[in-house]
Image: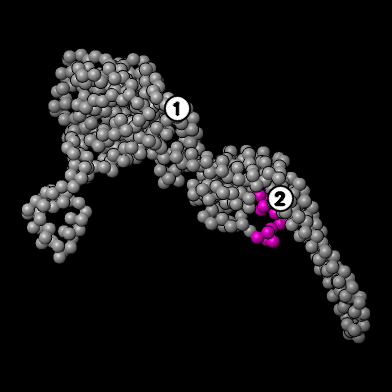
Amino acid sequence: MVADRFERVTWRDTYEQSAGLRELAEALEAHHDHATDLLTDVFLAAYKAGPRLREPAEMRASRLVNHQLLTQVMASPDFAELRRETVGDPYAAAMAVLAQSAALRRMLECSRGAREQAERAEEALRAAQDAAAAVAEALQRAADRAAPAGPTESYDDIPASALADPVRRAVEAAGAAGAAARQAAQDAAQAAAGAPGIRAAAHHGVAKAAGAVREETALMRAWGIGPGELERMPFERRARLAERLRTGRLAEWAELIGRFRQMADGERARKVENAPGELIGVTLGDDLSRLIPSELAHLGLPATRAVFAARYAAGELMLYDSRGEQSTGRGAVIACVDTSHSMYAAGPGGVTREAWSKACALALLDQARHAGRDFVGILFSAADKVRVFRFPAGRPTGIDQVLDFAETFLGGGTSYQTPLTAARELLEEEFDEAATVRGDIVMITDDECGVTEEWMRGWKDARRRLGFRVFGLAVGAPRAADAGSVLDALCDNLRSIEDLADVHAAADLFRVI
């Protein structure tokens, strides 16, 4: 593979950082010559913006087999798809190499006979080089013999055949050896190209690598990790993060979390900036904050400004119309997520209550980020078990903290007072520091429990002072959402979530928060 100095440096740095690459190279080199060179080329083929193979004539005979193997890799149907994820990304390119390890091992085994021919070609080439050196020596000897020994001797005194014959024989020997070496190299290359199983192994390996890289990209995207953040992440940390996301409960939740994020994005797109409610059409009026783009265009054209002014005075401007809903808050978004033992229960499709609840909470984290609001995740169970995770709006959201929030499970029973008290205190703190009101609390639970009258009086007083709203999601527990339940008394808006495979059950939540 043709590569510049910087691309070679990238490979060396990646090789030093990846224990997997080093172990693979060591294992292959134990049985196959030049295996590390092949790994280098496979990496560069995935990493480079414009990969280009050297011409066979430019290469040593012993490397021509690698040339053919790489040709088969680059000719695979899935190679272009693989490169869409790996170009310019050393980690993804290294991952592609590792994903093809079994295929590369198979290709090297299949090409063993071709490699033996290549070694013979290399020996023949060395013989040709020796013959060429003999030509040089013959020429030098001829020149030495042709030089006059003294002032009375001339070049004509030496027979021409004595000068020409040794040189001619050396040249012919060198040419024959060179031709034999080149022919042997070509035979080796052809043997590699036609070896049974090589093409199938190459195609299978590239398809597997494309799938692995695609899955990891989707996994990262589901957890809200963008390409830019990944590129800035050190190699080892990215490798540890990928391993963490691929194992345990987090791997099972990725698809659900991705669907929640996609749903929330769609609901945000339906909002009209500075206009409360759900967009349902176009109406007439004079509210300049809800002008449709064509009306703004009329305002921007001098020839139509007078018409715009007349229609404005008459209240006949075309405006976005929306269904009335409560306006969004300004304070923190706080998700109180039940992590009692019963949250392990699974619903339709094997989705657990915990998975649905935390996927919803992470989508609320995105919602808060887009609105420039603080987000707080409160995990709770029994009265003495609570964990608070704070994500201030002015700071980057660290993926490690997000994963800690998602993985934490407290177990035990259920207490409403503990998490709601923590949420109320956070909103009071926010009010005291920044005079911010109208926060939003989302209570996600699968259980019902009581609260004391004294606590309820303090709760109602805080709601009047701070103006926060409370949304309730009873996950897999319809009775908790019944009219007259404790949760019903605590919440402004309460719904029951029974189909845990349906992320749209809470869609309207993302239009009002």
Camera-nearest label, 2 or 1: 2
For disc 1, the neighbor class at 10 Å (few under 14, some 14 to 19, many from 20) is few
Where in the figure is residue 45, as x and y percent of width and height?
A: 57, 51
Q: Position of residue 117 (x, y in %)?
A: 77, 51
Q: In screen coordinates, is 174 left or right of 509? A: right
- The boundaries of the magenta stretch are 55-69
Identify the image quadrant of the N terminus. bottom right
Q: Find numbered disc 2 in the image and state the secondary structure of the residue it sits on.
A: helix
Residue at the image position 56 percent from the left and 55 percent from the top:
51
400 shown above or below 302? above
Residue 318, how many percent across, how many down? 16, 51
Say whether marks 2 and 1 touch (CB < 8 Å). no
Task: Identify the amino acid type marked 1.
Answer: Arg
Quadrant position of the C terminus in the picture: top left
Q: Is residue 347 magenta?
A: no
Image point (29%, 37%), residue name = 367
The quarter of the picture where residue 309 lies is: bottom left
Q: Which residue in the structure is indicated by mark 2?
A: 194
Please, what is the three-letter code of the amino acid marked with disc 2?
Gly
Mark 1 residue element: helix
Q: Is residue 293 left or right of residue 110?
A: left
**Farthest residue in the left direction?**
313
Is residue 40 at least partly visible in the picture?
no
Per the image, is 60 magenta?
Answer: yes
Q: In this view, does 359 lie above or below 181?
A: above
**In which image quadrant can residue 134 be found?**
bottom right
* In this rendering, position of residue 125 left or right of residue 107: right
Q: What residue is rendered at 16% in x and 26% in y?
A: 463
Residue at figure coordinates x 65%, y 47% from the top left: 199
Residue with the mark numbered 1: 249
Q: Is residue 469 visible?
A: yes
Going from the N terminus, do you reach mark 2 or mark 1 first?
2
